[in-house]
């Protein structure tokens, strides 16, 4: 594989980066010094602006140096390298054989100048991604195509494979769904409660704050709206590609096998329209730490969609599973004394492939995890549960918004469920083990539909790259109707090849488990 | 109401492997160390309220009651820790009010930590913690003597490699 010369990012980059923070800095400075300025005397203002210019020049100078020190290139072994740093030098090396996704992100400021950043993610613990910012859009797309071609073992200037758009969320649907979402309703009720409280204590003056009851929830809705606007799902040879964003455009690739758990969420106001949201637990995405893990675009497969469409998408990322066929057994009647509201909606069930749990009355949630993705199993019991002889069984998964919990079962049953789940996990992993990471793939021989030897992504030395026969080196790429699964050696799944399920065909049992 | 046969937290074999009783002493030592600044605070509060004697005595009485309760609770809590090694997985149990049982398949273990804080070290105890890819896996065994802890760690590491599965 040929090495390339070192390249810089676009020279305008420091300005774009500065513009991203400029509004915040300006506001902060104005708040801090604005009052003092005007009270001290008007002659200070030119001095103030002079000072700002000086600081600006210093920052620009630093940014210029940072830009000069930022290089990216491909080395002799075909890996992507990035070198950066003014004071502390940092060099990052990404093995493209473990590529999980290459995406182009466009923050608002970059969008205005038709530039974008390229985010390259490889399988590995934690910090295994590189972000090249900023390049002009054609350059960014060329870089993306080159990374994809190199990771597939093709000539670096092969064109990128086309993707087939499957689903797009309309702005109207998105807006309405966000209005009807449980978190919006709760915000509305809380704000209303606060306003009423203020009114009762402060008199009619409190009524002035009534408009806050509308503003507060709308603000929340606005945030999510800008994140998920124009959400598009497209199928491509390297996995499912998700794109969204009103101001900042982000994109993400979900290769097969990266999804560890899936959850269908439905607010009770969505039931009439048969809408559902799908959230994911993805390997390699740490818990963001804040409570917005479910709203962050990274862990949402689709923010709102018809049940049929959502189910079809889930079957794309988790091939061969059938959620609707799993019988869910309900919680015992005495769970009603512990969970007054949701006890009728609790349920757990499993078949040979997946474990399914159900919970929630006003916001119904159905969580699904394949047995081979279960990391550990827990049984917990609080004091109230102990008095009622109940316990909860948890199946632990990688960090993410999806929690798989069988709430408030009989204690003996909870233990039994845990034991059965562990046994199924062993069995499922053993079935996978026939093509485990100890065996190394030797390259071009692997046909696309056969699961290749899965690499433990935490292994230091990955097996050599396998070619992807679907991208013909001289052809235009796979025809839109082709059903393909990428089996790079960072393939984390050995699930059987997916069955083709067109998006608008109804699933066999059209009754949803709610 | 809890039917012993139906209990969710029975050990898989004969009994849970217990942790060292010295953990009780270690934890009570920590409690006493924490109680010192808290007592000072309560005394200050009492002095501030000295005009109303019964109100001044209240924080001190509450503090004493809480101290005694936690002292007793530590004893019970340490006795509730246990672990059991099976052929394919490890079970860890703990807790009295909030009981927990964790099952970790050996193949899922990514990391085995053996740590000891200063008080634990002075009493000759260590804590073994298993990590999987899930953040919610809660397999922590405190109060193990160092030889037992390192034996356990070595066994777990060997079994982990043997059963090693992908993510």
Image (cartoon, coloured by chain):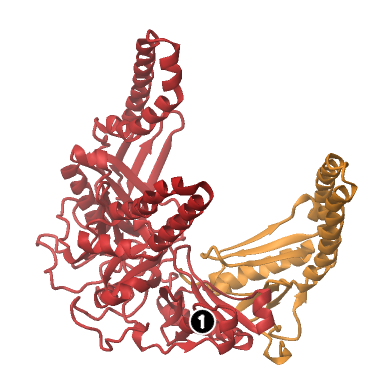
Q: Secondary structure at mark 1?
A: helix
Depth check: give the residue in front, A432 or A330: A330
Q: Position of residue A288 (x, y in %)?
A: 46, 54
Query: Is the C terminus of chain A in the top left, top right, bottom left or bottom right quadrant?
Result: bottom left
Q: Assess disc 1: are there few (<14), some (14-19) or many (≥20) residues with their C-alpha within 10 Å of its C-alpha.
A: many
Height in image: B159 above or below A233?
Answer: below
Residue found at the very far front of the displayed protein: A204
Residue A457, quarter of picture:
bottom left
Height in image: A103 above or below A24?
Answer: below
Task: Give the side of residue A161 with respect to residue A494, left or right.
Answer: left
Q: Position of residue A11 (x, y in %)?
A: 24, 30
Chain in red in the render: A
Q: Residue at x 45, y 12 (%)?
A: A40
- Report which colour depicts chain B: orange
Height in image: B15 above or below A57?
Answer: below
Task: Give the side of residue A259 with respect to residue B121, left or right.
Answer: left
Residue A64, quarter of picture:
top left
Q: Which residue is mark 1?
A: A343
Q: Position of residue A2 (x, y in %)?
A: 24, 47
Q: Residue at x 24, y 58 (%)?
A: A153
Counting the numbered discs, the total is 1
Task: Give the side of residue A192 with respect to residue A390, left or right.
Answer: left
């Amino acid at each position: 594989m040929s090495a390339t010369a070192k390249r810089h990012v676009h020279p305008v980059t420091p300005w774009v980066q500065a513009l991203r923070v400029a509004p915040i800095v300006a506001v902060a400075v104005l708040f801090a010094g604005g009052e003092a300025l005007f009270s001290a005397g008007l002659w200070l203002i030119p001095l103030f602006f002079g000072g700002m210019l000086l600081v600006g020049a210093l920052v620009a100078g630093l940014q210029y140096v940072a830009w000069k020190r930022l290089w990216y290139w491909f080395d002799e072994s075909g890996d992507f390298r990035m070198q950066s740093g003014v004071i502390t030098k940092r060099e990052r090396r990404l093995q493209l054989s473990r590529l999980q996704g290459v995406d182009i992100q466009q923050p608002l400021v970059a969008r205005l100048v038709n530039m974008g950043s390229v985010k390259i993610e490889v399988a590995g613990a934690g910090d295994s991604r590189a972000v090249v910012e900023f390049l002009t859009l054609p350059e960014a797309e060329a870089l993306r195509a080159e990374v994809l071609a190199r990771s597939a073992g093709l000539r670096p200037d092969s064109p990128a494979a086309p993707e087939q758009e499957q689903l797009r969320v309309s702005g109207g649907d998105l807006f309405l769904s966000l209005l009807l979402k449980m978190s919006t309703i709760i915000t509305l009720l809380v704000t209303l409660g606060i306003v009423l409280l203020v009114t009762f204590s402060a008199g009619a003056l409190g009524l002035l704050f009534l408009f806050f009851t509308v503003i507060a929830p709308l603000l929340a809705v606005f945030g999510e709206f800008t994140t998920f606007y124009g959400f598009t799902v497209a199928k491509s040879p390297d996995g499912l590609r998700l794109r969204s964003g009103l101001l900042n455009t982000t994109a993400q690739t979900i290769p097969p096998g990266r999804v560890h758990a899936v959850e269908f969420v439905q607010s009770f106001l969505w039931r009439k329209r048969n809408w559902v949201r799908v959230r994911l637990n993805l390997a390699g995405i740490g818990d963001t730490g804040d409570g917005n893990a479910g709203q962050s675009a990274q862990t949402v497969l689709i923010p709102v969609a018809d049940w049929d469409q959502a189910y079809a998408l889930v079957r794309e990322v988790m091939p061969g599973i059938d959620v609707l066929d799993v019988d869910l057994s309900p919680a015992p009647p005495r769970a009603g004394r512990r969970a007054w509201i949701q006890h009728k909606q609790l349920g757990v069930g499993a078949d040979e492939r997946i474990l399914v749990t159900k919970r929630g009355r006003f916001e119904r949630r159905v969580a699904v995890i394949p047995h081979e993705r279960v990391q550990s199993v827990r049984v917990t019991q609080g004091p109230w549960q102990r008095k009622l002889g109940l316990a909860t069984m948890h199946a632990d998964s990688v960090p993410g918004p999806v929690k798989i919990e069988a709430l408030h079962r009989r204690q003996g049953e909870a233990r039994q469920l845990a034991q059965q789940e562990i046994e199924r996990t062993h069995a499922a992993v053993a079935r996978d083990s026939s093509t485990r990471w100890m065996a190394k793939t030797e390259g071009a021989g692997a046909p696309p539909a056969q699961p290749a030897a899965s690499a433990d992504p935490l292994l230091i030395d990955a097996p050599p790259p396998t070619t992807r026969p679907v991208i013909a080196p001289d052809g235009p790429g796979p025809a839109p109707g082709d059903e393909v699964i990428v089996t790079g050696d960072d393939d984390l799944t050995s699930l059987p090849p997916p069955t083709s399920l067109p998006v608008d065909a109804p699933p066999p049992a059209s009754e949803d488990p709610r | 109401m809890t039917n012993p046969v139906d209990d969710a937290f029975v050990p898989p074999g004969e009994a849970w492997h217990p942790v060292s009783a010295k953990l009780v002493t270690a934890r009570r030592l920590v409690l006493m160390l924490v109680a010192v600044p808290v007592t000072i605070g309560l005394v200050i509060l009492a002095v501030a309220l000295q005009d109303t004697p019964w109100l001044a005595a209240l924080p001190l009485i509450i503090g004493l009651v809480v101290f005694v309760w936690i002292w007793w609770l530590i004893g019970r809590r340490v006795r509730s820790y246990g672990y059991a090694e099976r052929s394919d997985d490890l079970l860890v149990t703990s807790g009295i009010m909030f009981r927990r049982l964790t099952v970790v398949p050996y193949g899922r273990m990514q990391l085995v930590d053996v740590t000891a804080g200063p008080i634990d070290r002075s009493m000759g105890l260590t804590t073994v913690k298993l990590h999987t890819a899930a953040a919610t896996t809660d397999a922590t065994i405190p109060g193990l003597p160092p030889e037992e802890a390192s034996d356990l760690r070595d066994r777990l590491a060997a079994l982990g490699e043997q059963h090693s599965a992908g993510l």
